Image: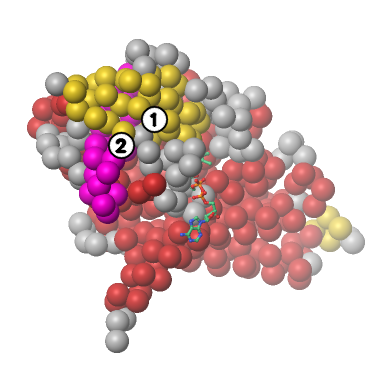
Amino acid sequence: MIDLTDTQKAIVETVRDFVEKEVIPVADEMEHRDEFPEAIVEQMKELGLFGLTVDEAYGGIGESLTTYALAVVELARGWMSLSGVLNTHFMGCYLINKFGTQEQKDSFLPRMATGEIRAALAMSEPEAGSDVQGIRTKAIKDGDDYVVNGQKMWLTNGLRSGIVMTLVKTDPGSDPPHRGMSMLIVEKEPGNPKPAPGLDVGKNIEKMGYKGVETTEMTFDDFRCPTSSLLGTEEGQGFRQVLDAIEVGRVNVSARAVGLATRAFEEAIRYSQQRKAFGKPISQHQAIQIHLAEMGTTLEAARLMLLSAAAKKSAGERSDLEAAMAKLFASEACHEITVKALRVHGGYGYSKEFTIERLYRDAPFLLIGEGTSEIQKTVIARRLLEKYKT
Ligand SMILES: Cc1cc2nc3c(=O)[nH]c(=O)nc-3n(C[C@H](O)[C@H](O)[C@H](O)COP(=O)(O)OP(=O)(O)OC[C@H]3O[C@@H](n4cnc5c(N)ncnc54)[C@H](O)[C@@H]3O)c2cc1C
């Protein structure tokens, strides 16, 4: 469907090779121990993955969202959590590159391109996830500082990140609320749970899957940061900025879903040819063949939708509809494919000895992150009604 450039082919091949040699042999065990993949992340830095989409002028590779999505497919085929370490960082790079001042770009992007500092994204709160405008964290100007108060929830990379792209209300009384929202670049010491006065990173939230990468809370209690922490120059732009970043985030989740589902499919089709029941490989039973046919077909459709959405966003076109459709379809397809792959494995699929057990626990997060399936449907319906207005 799309012709890959020589650079894209080389990047995909390099990441695939890296995943085969360095990730797949250790991923199951590390995941079971909920261990942060420190050595693998160091290798990802050396491969230049943290700077894949950062302009060459800032020391990155300057590749498109499509290339990024292709790399994420390969990483998630090995272990979805690796794409989690990368993704909030990628969204941070995207936000600073698109909306940051020249000083902000010069200050952050070169260090982000090498992975020296990594980014987290703090949007969700204990009482506001889907309802982004319902956030309560506020940043009020006091001289040359903002004073920030509030609580953030579900921060992927919350502990180890060096900057946190934090959505706040700079005008809490604004009506509509989105006009009073802004994005701050909060700098902090990576790995320190109490990195600054008034800033507290909560403990790692224990999760059913998506292990290894940490997910934390973050509390701001009269935390002070300079007014130069505002992303860009103008308050009130945060909602627009975050919605833009979420579009690329949705392409990323679609890519994770395609990678994870590819692995589940591969595990199932291999196992089905090895396991015998009633005197023949289970792949010769029609019921299993139907599972394999459905898995292969939905996987192919998800891949095509991912590439189409990524190409549109990479070309700078409006792509909220396509990104939401790809995210909805790919994450639901991935969930179904992991369930079918588990069925194909019979009882062994329920054992931690088999990779499908991990894939089955990782898949549900994709139905939630970057907007739930229900929210994707509301976005899709709104856009379709706009497009086909009578
Ligand atoms: C492992 C993990 C990592 C995460 N990482 C991050 C991160 O790095 N940064 C960050 O900011 N957030 C992160 N999140 C938060 C994530 O984005 C939210 O969980 C998600 O947006 C859903 O919000 P919620 O959990 O508050 O659910 P709610 O918004 O409370 O939704 C609950 C249910 O109601 C439905 N619902 C809500 N509103 C509507 C509506 N209008 N119409 C129909 N149905 C509706 C939802 O679909 C869902 O089924 C993470 C979450 C998890 C689990």
Residue 13 appears left or right of 36? left
- Residue depicted at x 12% and y 36%: 233
Look at the picture and state if 165 lies above or below 263. Answer: above
Name the foreground residue: 331 vs 311.
331
Q: Quadrant of the C terminus?
A: bottom left
Precedes in sequence: disc 1 or disc 2: 1
Q: Provide the residue span drawn in magenta.
A: 162-188
Residue 320 appears left or right of 367? left
Q: Residues within 10 Å of mark 2 (few under 14, many from 20)?
A: many
Q: Amino acid at mark 1?
A: Gly
Look at the picture and state if 65 lies above or below 14. Answer: below
Q: Is disc 1 in contact with disc 2, using a CB cutoff of under 8 Å? A: yes
Residue 310: which quarter of the image? bottom left
Q: Amino acid at mark 2?
A: Val
Instruction: Look at mark 2 in the image and give the residue it sits on.
Output: 168
Look at the picture and state if 298 lies above or below 141. Answer: below
- Gap between marks 1 and 2 measured at Cα: 9 Å
Q: Residues within 10 Å of mark 1 (few under 14, many from 20)?
A: some
Whether residue 65 is visible to the viewer of this picture, yes or no, is: no
Q: Which mark is residue 150?
A: 1
Give SS at disc 1: strand
Residue 227: which quarter of the image? top left
Name the foreground residue: 386 vs 73.
386
* Residue 142, percent from left and from top: 19, 23
Residue 53 appears left or right of 291? left
Whether residue 166 is visible to the viewer of this picture, yes or no, is: yes
Residue 107 appears left or right of 14? left
Q: Quadrant of the N terminus?
A: bottom left
Name the foreground residue: 147 vs 237.
147
